[in-house]
């Protein structure tokens, strides 16, 4: 499916969403944000697709940020509306029931880092450059950068990145926990596919509830988070897949999960 600025490629059990504005380093204009939302919705409800990999077209950029020519026209009201729409997209990705991997194949700046932050896993190629340069434009991050970055890498590093607006390379992103791993650019696709394959070999409901427990738990205090974990654990205990998974282990065979 080609939405114009976004390509959706189905390679069951994997789905690829590719941001395709290479002449603008895949910068996110409003149209692209809407197309990304539609792309993620379509694969979310597709039973053939068990995991989604998000990347940018070309070998230079994942996403070089929100489209600055659009940012230049925003005022207080339209600016707030604009980021609320972008935040809907990042929430859709963050709360996806299936694992979402960001394959960061170059510049991931501003909205690019924020889009990656919403994904469950981030794999970067060696040429990746990340950062939140909004302050250089007189703005602040608006697609969750002040919130998710601090939750992922801690307040100190988030303050440093957001207040300096500096770009960091892939190795530094790895060192601060902003990305899960760094690979050669030629290995990025195969690494993401292998990791997706490893995750989706597991029980689908267990993946869904793990994502929920981690995401929702981070917004709670520890006792409440543990209670949520107990509740979701209980639900998985009554699933056909937990019956199958535990039985398969005891019978020394591979489990055949059904997602029920
Ligand atoms: N919004 C709109 N257009 C963008 C863009 C963005 N965020 N990032 C890059 N582009 C466009 C450039 O304007 C240029 O378009 P043109 O060829 O029509 O002039 C094209 O993409 C290529 O970018 P260019 O700057 O020539 O590439 P470069 O290799 O010299 O530099 C970057 C790459 C990423 C360092 C540089 O493009 C940049 O700083 N981009 C903005 C990053 C940013 O501030 N993002 C956060 C926005 S909140």
Image: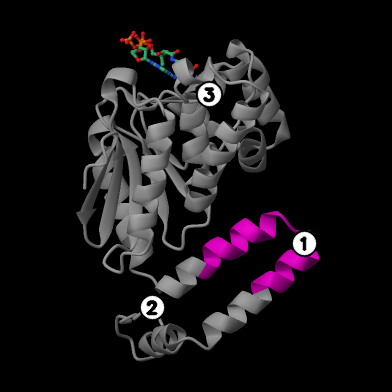
Q: Nearer the viewer, mark 1 or mark 2?
A: 2
In the picture, measured across the screen, residue 36 lies left or right of residue 10, that is right
Circle nearer the N terminus (3, 1): 3
Query: Which quarter of the picture shows residue 247?
Result: bottom left
- Taking the magenta stretch, the answer to whether it contains residue 148 is no
Residues in magenta, as a range: 209-229
Residue at the image point whose x is 62% and y is 23% from the top: 161
Secondary structure under tag 2 reads loop
The structure residue drawn at horizontal position 27% and vertical position 57%, both measured from the top left corner, is 14
Q: Residue 85's spot in the image, x, y percent?
A: 54, 40
Majority secondary structure of magenta residues: helix
Q: Residue 244, position in %: x, y?
A: 39, 87
Q: Name the residue under label 2.
A: 259
Look at 68% across and 71% down and name the residue there.
228
Q: Which of marks 3 and 2 is nearer the N terminus?
A: 3
Q: How crowded is mark 2: few (under 14 residues within 10 Å), some or many (20 or more)?
A: some
Mark 1 → mark 2, Cα distance in angstroms = 29 Å
Mark 1 lies on residue: 222
In the shown orientation, is residue 165 left or right of residue 241?
right
CA–CA distance between discs 3 and 2? 38 Å
On the rendered image, what quadrant is the C terminus found in?
Answer: bottom left
Q: Nearest the camera: 143 or 69?
A: 69
Q: Is 119 above or below relative to 23? A: below
Figure quarter occupied by ligand 1:
top left
Q: How crowded is mark 1: few (under 14 residues within 10 Å), some or many (20 or more)?
A: few
Task: Please give the residue where the numbered disc 3 appears in the rendered image.
Answer: 131
């Amino acid at each position: 499916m080609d939405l114009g600025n976004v390509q959706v490629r189905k390679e069951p059990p994997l789905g690829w969403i590719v941001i395709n504005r290479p002449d603008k380093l895949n910068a996110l204009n409003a149209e692209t944000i809407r197309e990304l939302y539609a792309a993620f919705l379509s694969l979310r409800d597709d039973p053939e697709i068990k995991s989604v990999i998000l990347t940018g077209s070309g070998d230079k950029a994942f996403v070089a940020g929100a489209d600055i020519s659009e940012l230049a026209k925003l005022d207080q009201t339209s600016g707030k509306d604009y980021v609320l729409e972008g935040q809907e997209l990042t929430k859709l990705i963050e709360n996806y029931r299936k694992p979402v991997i960001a394959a960061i194949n170059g510049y991931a700046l501003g909205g690019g880092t924020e889009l990656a932050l919403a994904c469950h896993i981030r794999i970067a190629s060696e040429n990746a450059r990340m950062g939140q340069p909004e302050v250089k434009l007189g703005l602040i991050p608006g697609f969750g950068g002040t919130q998710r970055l601090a939750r992922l890498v801690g307040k100190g590093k988030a303050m440093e990145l957001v207040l300096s607006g500096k770009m960091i390379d892939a190795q530094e992103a790895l060192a601060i926990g902003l990305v899960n791993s760094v690979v050669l650019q030629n290995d990025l696709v195969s690494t993401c596919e292998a990791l997706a394959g490893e995750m989706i070999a597991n029980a689908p409901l267990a993946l869904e509830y793990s994502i929920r427990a981690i995401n929702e738990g981070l917004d709670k205090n520890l006792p409440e988070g543990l209670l949520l974990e107990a509740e979701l654990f209980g639900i998985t205990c009554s699933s056909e897949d937990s019956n199958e998974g535990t039985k398969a282990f005891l019978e020394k065979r591979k489990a055949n999960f059904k997602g029920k």
